Image (spheres, rainbow, N blue to C red):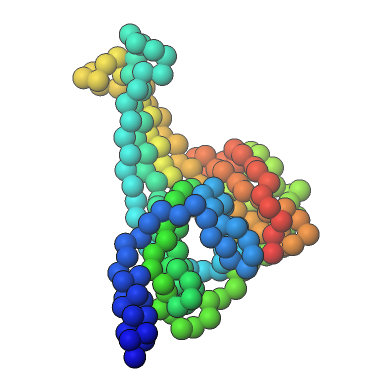
Amino acid sequence: MRTFALAALASALLASLPARASSSFRCDGKVIEVGTTQLDLLMACGRASFEDSRIDDRLSVQQPNGPGTPFQRRSLQVNVNTWTYDFGSTRFVMTVTLERGRITAISEGSYGRDARPHEKGWAPTTQCEPQQLSEGMTKADVLSRCGEPPVRETATEFVSAQENELTPPVSSATYAREYWSYNFGPQRLSRHLVFENGVLKRLNDGKYGS
């Protein structure tokens, strides 16, 4: 009886522990860590048990060319996703923070409560060929060839230059960026796309798909 009471007390104490930072965890034998892409997270762990999102506004003012040169003001609006995975009562709950298609933070909570088996990792396979994608294409071009991507995130940056912090801007620019990822199946590398103001500016190979 005493052993049962001690076990119950230990479980209650563990459940009340606050979330703490973690460096990594595993899904289906695959390591998930800071820097892992959102597509790789989906393919390894599937959809999260709970998903939340918010818009963060970040402002920085600097003199990129040194003292005495014009100030540069950067305002960034970025979509921040928080995904929580409950793997059941034998594993800790894991929460990941995602920005622009990549994990930026991982935290570990108490033991899970979900009695249902967690779904396996999966992401839709794209039917187009990777060779069909090239820099300079518009979003409409890519969508017409490859369809909607499994991962599609946004960030908007406003950049202005001014003589000092009190004077009005002498120039300004807006960069609307989107981060897309496509899964081409287990025999080919996934691809990560960065659009700027509707035009494909950067293409990066990822890991093999699922």
Task: Please state, as top left, top right, bottom left or bottom right, where the N terminus lies in the image.
Answer: bottom left
At which x and y percent is residue 21?
41, 53
Identify which residue, 140 or 200, lies in the foreground.
200
Is residue 204 positioned above or below 38 on the image?
above
Identify the residue at image location x=37%, y=80%.
Answer: 7
At which x and y percent is residue 108?
42, 61
Residue 27 placement, left or right of 130: left
At which x and y percent is residue 93?
43, 68
Residue 135 placement, left or right of 46: right
Identify the residue at image location x=25%, y=20%.
Answer: 165
Among all residues in the image, which is located at the extreme left? Answer: 166
Is residue 25 positioned above or below 86 on the image?
above
Identify which residue, 104 or 163, lies in the foreground.
104
One can see residue 81 in this view: no
Quadrant of residue 150 within the rendered picture? bottom right
Is residue 31 positioned above or below 12 on the image?
above
One can see residue 65 in this view: yes
Quadrant of residue 70 within the rendered picture? top left
Identify the residue at image location x=32%, y=43%.
Answer: 57
Is residue 142 positioned above or below 168 on the image?
below
Identify which residue, 192 or 7, lies in the foreground.
7
At which x and y percent is residue 107?
42, 57
